[in-house]
Amino acid sequence: MAAKNIFKVSFYNQSNVYEVYATKVYQSDLHGFITIEELKFNERTSVVVDPSEEKLKTEFDQVKRFFVPMHAIIRIDEVKKEGVAKISEAGENIAHFPSHIYNTSNDKDNKS
């Protein structure tokens, strides 16, 4: 049996950075979205519990697939093995991809 590819996907969600592992990641039929399916979570037998990973497990418990806007994607990596899924705050070293479409400025001088 061939080994499944594992992808690490980092994306913005409500001013946080989500890092999840999945076996299926592809461009969606919904224009401008990436589809993420078959999330992978570490099934550890240790007593130590990572609250960030537990929050992700709960949030995506009944989710078959989900869609992330392309402009929210930070990075997609194909990895050899899955790691720990986590949620972290977006720091100063991470910036949104610049786009005039999502400009929320109320500056009237910028309107054409």
Image (cartoon, rainbow, N blue to C red):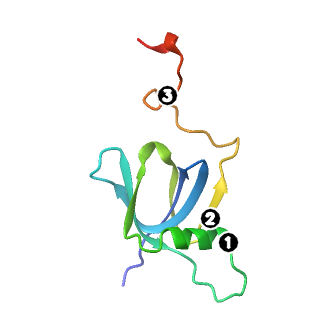
Q: Is residue 18 above or below residue 102?
A: below
Q: In this picture, is 107 found above or below 95?
A: above
Residue for point 51% across, 28% down: 104
Mark 2 highlights which residue? 86
Query: What residue did someone put label 1 on?
Result: 51
Residue farthest along the left direction in this orientation: 29
Badge 3 density bin: few <14, some 14–19, many ≥20, Cα 10 Å: few
**Residues at marks 1 and 2, CA–CA distance in whole angstroms:** 9 Å
| Amino acid type of the residue that numbered disc 3 sits on in the rendered structure | Asn
- Of circles 1 and 2, the one toward us is 1
- Relative side of 69 to 14, left or right: left
Element type at mark 2? strand
Instruction: Give the residue at mark 3.
Output: 103
Nearer the observer, 58 or 48: 58
Q: Position of residue 72 (x, y in %)?
A: 49, 46
Amino acid at dot 2: Lys
Label 3 sits on a secondary structure element that is loop
Q: Amino acid at mark 1?
A: Pro
Residue at 62%, 60% (x, y): give it: 87
Mark 2 residue crowding within 10 angstroms, few (<14) / some (14–19) / many (20+):
some
Q: Which of 51/42 is in front?
A: 51
